[in-house]
Image (cartoon, rainbow, N blue to C red):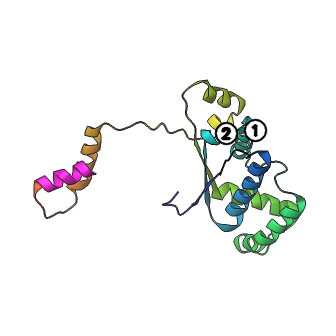
Amino acid sequence: SFIAQYRTFVLNVQKAYGQVQLLEDLKSLYRMAATLTPVTFLFTDTEVKDEFFLEYINMILTTGEIAGLHSKDELEILFEDLRPVALRELGPSFNDTSDNMYRYFLNRVQDRLHLVLSLSPVGPQFRQWARKFPGIISRCTIDWFSPWPPAALYATAESALQGFDMVCPDRRREVLAQHM
């Protein structure tokens, strides 16, 4: 996310955080992704206060659209902000009707919003969520993070340093590989 110069968006879940606050955060997330900058939405299992949170995550993953997220007035304001961008991107032949602008808005959000789920597979909870919300499995790339053995890390560091010209004693190169 940092390398791609995406902004990172994280929910600020507190004790009184509920559906209303989640929908407001998702509105601002969609607005940010559509009009400002590409966004990475980081969502962890500690932020699941209720399973309806995952219902919205599943909607984002499967269709990219959250039904009823924006009112008609809010959409019109969004369309006004996006209209110049759409005309510049798609050319003057773009017919900027409400339906076309809505499709453009969703396509832009889908192109510029990346969702990172950090869910622990330990215990029965993840299996239950995967059955109830199939987008978590079918619409994601799953990375299992396991620690590397120290020997593999050292070999990788040595390999990276082999093609690098350094004027130093061999012992210093070994210490640098250990550090890496």
Q: Cα distance, mark 2 to mark 1?
A: 8 Å
Nearer to the camera, 68 or 112: 68
Closer to us: 97 or 16 = 16
Which residue type does callout 2 highlight? Val
Residue 172 vs 150, above or below: the answer is: below
Q: Is residue 177 left or right of residue 126?
A: left
- The mark found on residue 48 in the picture is 2
Q: Is residue 90 left or right of residue 1?
A: right
Visible residue check, residue 43: yes
Picture residue at 68% right of the left edge, 61% below the top: 33
Start-end of magenta stretch: 171-179
Residue type indicated by callout 1: Phe
State the image coordinates of residue 136 (x, y, percent, origin top left).
Answer: 64, 37
Residue 177 included in the magenta stretch of the image = yes
Please tell me the numbered disc located at residue 52: 1
**Quick one: which residue is furthest to the left in this view?**
169
Query: For the residue labelled by badge 1, is the local secondary structure a helix, a strand or a loop?
Result: helix
Q: Nearer the viewer, residue 21 or 44?
A: 21
